[in-house]
Amino acid sequence: MMRNAEAGMARRTGMGHGRMVVAAMIALTLAGCASAPVPTFDLSAPTGFTARGGSNGQLVVVSPTALAVLDSEKIVVEPAPGQITYLPDAQWSDKLSSLLQARTVQAFENGSKLRRVARPGDGVAGDYQLNMDIRSFGVKVLPEGTFAVVEISAKLIGSASGKILAARIFSARVPLASVSSTSATSALDQASNQVLIELVRWASAAQG
């Protein structure tokens, strides 16, 4: 009787252990799925264009300002006016303000003949300062269709006087056939490039 009881206990213990192992494997699998990395996308800096005008002064590009809903790695989608959501399967490679500042500096270096452009942390005493505010940077569903929309307000300030020398709002939108991570980020990159080319040309001419 004792041997039969011990055998039964061993069988029950073995079954319990097996179930625990299976449960642990399922938990690890689910944890692995939950922690799968989100695909990361980058913005490019426009090339192959020229910006006329300018002076011998140095330009400092300040980090753009933006509402918290925009200034993150998340990619904004507005399915209706006043509604904000994010692409679930895509993110930017950095906070939007930092990413846009870097691409703006590169755009000036690529298109401006002066190439005297820097960021505040570079230790440059600029003659001019470029301030930007990101008004819109994401996918918008509008009555006429779905678009990648980029809108930036820019101000060129004389560092010595502290006065606004020029101000302008730049905007671009690129149509989207579908809201997927690849198409949305590609369209936003195109819209961003359009805005940056116009911004560089405007700011270069305004410095003259």
Image (cartoon, rainbow, N blue to C red):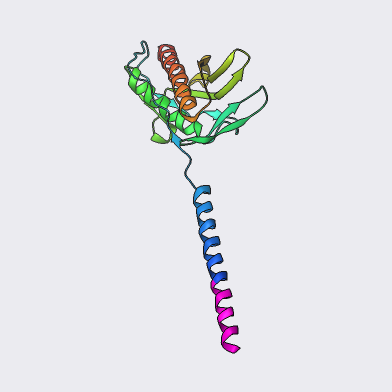
Q: Where is residue 128? Give x, y as percent.
A: 44, 22
**Side of 196 relative to 66 (left or right):** left
Residue 138 seen in the figure: yes
- For image coordinates 47% across by 44% down, the residue present is 37
Majority secondary structure in the magenta region = helix
Looking at the image, the residue that sits furthest to the bottom is 2
Q: Which residues are magenta?
A: 1-14
Residue 159 seen in the figure: no
Which quarter of the rendering shows the C terminus?
Answer: top left
Q: Which of the pair 73/109 is nearer the observer?
A: 73
Q: Is residue 181 above or below residue 153?
A: below
Magenta segment: does it hold 36? Answer: no
Q: Which of the pair 4/174 is nearer the observer?
A: 4
For residue 105, which quarter of the picture? top left
Q: Is residue 40 above or below residue 191?
A: below
- For image coordinates 58% across by 15% down, the residue present is 145
Q: Is residue 199 above or below residue 11?
A: above
Which quarter of the rendering shows the N terminus?
Answer: bottom right
Q: Which of the pair 131/46 is nearer the observer?
A: 46
- For image coordinates 42% across by 22% down, the residue present is 127
Q: Which of the pair 178/162 is nearer the observer?
A: 178
Q: Where is residue 47? Give x, y as percent.
A: 34, 19
Q: Where is residue 12? Give x, y as percent.
A: 58, 74
Q: Where is residue 110? Give x, y as percent.
A: 33, 21
Say how many tags the image has. 0
Q: Is residue 127 above or below residue 68?
A: above
Magenta segment: does it hold 5? Answer: yes
